[in-house]
Image (tube, helix red, strand yellow):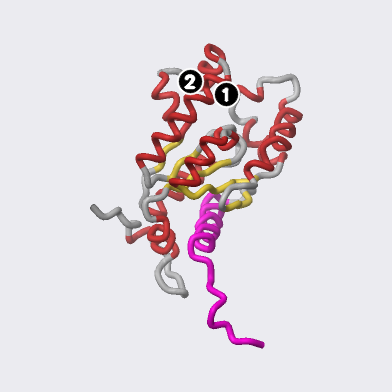
Amino acid sequence: MSEPEPRAENLRADEHGPPIELRVRRALGARSIVLVGLMGAGKSTVGRRLAGRLGMIFKDADNEIEAAAGLTIPDIFAIYGEPSFREGEERVIGRLLREGPLVIATGGGAFMRETTRERIRESGVSVWLKAELDVLMRRVRKRGNRPLLQTEDPEETMRALMEARHPVYGGADVAVLSREVSHDRVVQDVLEALDQHLDPPSSEGVAAQ
């Protein structure tokens, strides 16, 4: 059974041939798009809009974990601890990848697990939404349900997370800057980065100078 293609009303004209949504969707095949990055990077919001542009189903891994456990993420951390949460997170992301192709937003620590990174490499394309510290802090302060930031100095905690995680996030297939512009602009940046990654321009046929 063929996969659904982006809805016609979502397609945007492209001077280089088929609309970018169709090019990306076809190049993905059965693979999922997996958004990674720190809390506050905009993975859920961008992922939802990206899925709409591509005619794909969006899944938020944190929401799926809460549904499976019947508990909120803060409660899971409080009752069972972070190691137990990470094990459940790994199982949920593995299941979502098997159900693909989807657009999946992951929690900030998900990509740190080697098993999860390997599964994403096998069944998906990873997109790192990278944001500066001040941008992340402005966003996370709007919500008080971040277990890892329940510290005396949340900004220093975030800085430490950036230092530890950015080198690992750097192994993602694509990196896009999540900045203080419209979400649609960031979605377009993601599409363009995916388009280039999935179908890079060929150097053949370029006339010698």
In-image side of 162 versus 128 (left or right): right
Tags 1 and 2 touching, CB below 8 Å: yes
Spot occupied by residue 34 in the image (x, y as percentages of width and height): 49, 44
The label on residue 84 is: none
* Screen quadrant of the C terminus: bottom right
The amino acid at mark 1 is Asn
Residue visible at 61% across and 31% down? Answer: 142
Could you tell whether 196 is left or right of 163 in the image? left
Q: Report the residue marked by disc 2.
A: 72
Q: Which residues are magenta?
A: 182-209
| Numbered tag placed on residue 145 in the rendering | 1
Q: Nearer the viewer, residue 159 or 200?
A: 200
Outermost left residue? 1
Dot 2: within a 10 Å radius of its alpha carbon, few (fewer than 14), some, or many (20 or more) residues? some
Q: Is residue 125 above or below residue 77?
A: below
Which of the 4 image quadrants contains residue 117?
top right
Q: Does residue 147 appear to the left or right of 116 in the view shown?
A: right
Q: Pinpoint residue 15: horizontal percent, then vertical percent.
A: 46, 75
Q: Is residue 203 magenta?
A: yes
Residue 49 percent coordinates (x, y): 45, 48
Residue drawn 40% across and 69% down?
Answer: 18
Q: Residue at x 60, y 51 (%)?
A: 175
Mark before the other along the chain sequence, 1 or 2:
2
How would you rate the neighbour count of disc 1 (Cα within 10 Å): few for under 14, some for 14-19, many for 20 or more?
some
